[in-house]
Image: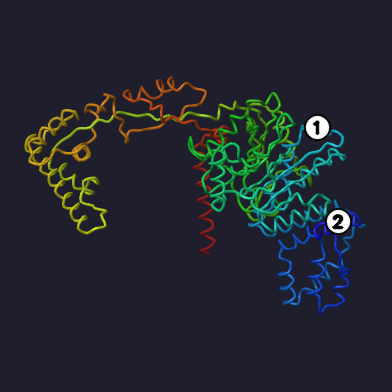
Amino acid sequence: MKGKSENIIRSRLTHVTGSRFYNTSKLDFQKLLDDPNSLATNLNSYLHAFSPNVRQIMERFSFSDHIERLNEKNLLYEVIKSFAAIDLSPGRIDNLQMGYIFEELIRVGAEQANEEAGEHFTPREIIHLMVELLLTNEDDLGEPHVVKKIFDPACGTGGMLSMAEQYIRELNKDAQPYLYGQDWNDEAFAICKSDMLLKGENAENIKPGDSFSDDGFKEETFDYMMANPPFGVEWKQQKQFIEKEHKTMGHDGRFGAGLPRINDGALLFLQHMISKMEDPKKGGSRIGIVFNGSPLFTGDAGSGESEIRRWIIENDWLEGIVALPEQMFYNTGISTYIWILSNRKPRHRKGKVQLVDARQFWVPMRKSLGHKRRQIGEGKNGRPDQIGLISKIYGEFIHDDTRTVPVNGGEKEMVVSKVFDNEDFGYHKITVERPLRLNFQASSERIARIEEEKAFVNLTNSKKTSEKARQKEIEAGQKRQQAIREVLEMLRQQTGEEQFKDREAFLGVLKKVERQTAGDKLSATERKVVLSALSERDETAEICRNSKGEPEPDPELKDTEVVPLKEDIEAYFQREVLPHVPDAWIDHNKTRVGYEIPLTRHFYQYEPPRPLEEIQEDLAELEKDIVGMLKEVVA
């Protein structure tokens, strides 16, 4: 009954205040300042009087600890005094304006943090571009009172959610976007939830915790999903949980397609998002996610990463990838990419993937912020509208779309868009075997090798715990070693170090010698050790064959070939392999299907080196400059 009464009281207070949060304290900032000796105690009391949703935020920020530290340094009074001097009352600043102020504080704080900023803050123009790519040409967004659910599983401070909401509301003031997010970082979660409260959104849709092991939105589906998951972050802490779900649930869970290597969980986020796609019959979903280069190509055929790419592309969910300029993020200068996925592709995109090269679409920052030295122009403050241009290129969906692009202070005609069939990214990785060819000789040099053969050495090793039994086993092993030595010595005497190029002929001689010795015949393992010690690879020798008469493969000559998925394997083998190694064959049991997206390779343009004369002229000019500077130093 107590819990029910509390809920009724909270509901009434929320109704009275007109907000999703409230404070029952009689204190305000001015009253707090009137009693400076009890400021810390009264401030904690004031904060504790907030509604539970706000108190949760305060706890994540560890406000009590900060208050205590400021009080110890005699700074608390000045901080409260500064806040009391600012009029942020609802009558002067509405929820939307307050949200913008809050976002600006987040941005400034992120920029000041520099290298740590990228953990919680995605540059605004990247979010702007992703929103444009996701929501442009979405016809139903203009419908009256349209409802859309937007989700970010690594929401950080909520920038992506806020900008998606802003875009939809500017397009249609009657639209109803509902925002959902989750983040494991306490402070980032608290900031995001605060932002939602200030804007009048349902802050209960922002969840704390790890999206993998503590999914805050089980069974939920969303219309749009956006994320900028951490680059190259291990998932070792969630390993046990994720592997269990992968093994026990398969495709009924979130990670059925495969697991990436332990040091990069980016593709786990994407699988997590795909699992929350709405049924295409009910409208389907669109996903935008920022990755570094690793998810494009890391992992060989059959690996977790390749299998995830295969699952995505064969299900026709990958719509396009946009390559972004370098030096765009605060905490890294590496290349980054926006992936766009959808389970409701328009007809002309079905079975296709578009790659857009936007690496040259940038303007320099007026001031570097950590690793961020570039930004994509948003068409403001005299900057070009590069976001609009990239969105236009993506929307036009033209193969070999060529544009004039600024490069190194000049301009250059470059291909900025290519369109591929899904199968263009797939390949068969075939294993090419060649036959084992050995010659054999019982020379003194080769016989000496037997002492280094692992199986020969192990004959005198024992794992028995009883000393008596262990010694007995060692002695038996030494006896077998001596028997093998005797066979080899007799073999040397009888063959006169003759070289055999046929393994079967040599085996016949070896078995004949075994029967002539006093000891037992060699076991199959011991005979294998002898053949290993006395053999050498020889291209002129006969092919070694198994009991079925089939050629045995030489592990040292094994090779692999990558055959495009659209090409016939046998035709490729006949054309590319057999002319060079006529005795080769394909081990079809080892053939694997792989997928990779070599974006930069598809947009590579060969640039011939400058003429030698130009280079020599430049060097001569540099030499003159150096001589001139040296003369100034001497003078």
Which structural element holds mark 1? Answer: helix
Percent across and percent down for residue 316 are 62, 29
Residues at marks 1 and 2 touching, judged by CB atoms closer than 8 Å: no
Left/right placement of residue 555 relative to residue 212 reads left
Which label sits on residue 140?
1
Specify few, some or many for label 1: CA neighbours under 10 Å numbering under 14, 14-19, or 20 or more.
few
Q: Is residue 90 visible?
A: yes
The residue sitting at 82% across, 53% down in the picture is: 99
| Amino acid tagged 2 | Ile
Q: Which residue is mark 2?
A: 8
Q: Is residue 612 visible?
A: no
**Dot 1 or dot 2, earlier in sequence:** 2
Percent across and percent down for residue 448 are 16, 45
Which structural element holds mark 2? Answer: helix
Residue 346, picture quadrant: top right
Residue 380, picture quadrant: top right
Closer to the camera, 165 or 473? Answer: 473
Specify few, some or many for label 2: CA neighbours under 10 Å numbering under 14, 14-19, or 20 or more.
few
Percent across and percent down for residue 279 are 70, 32
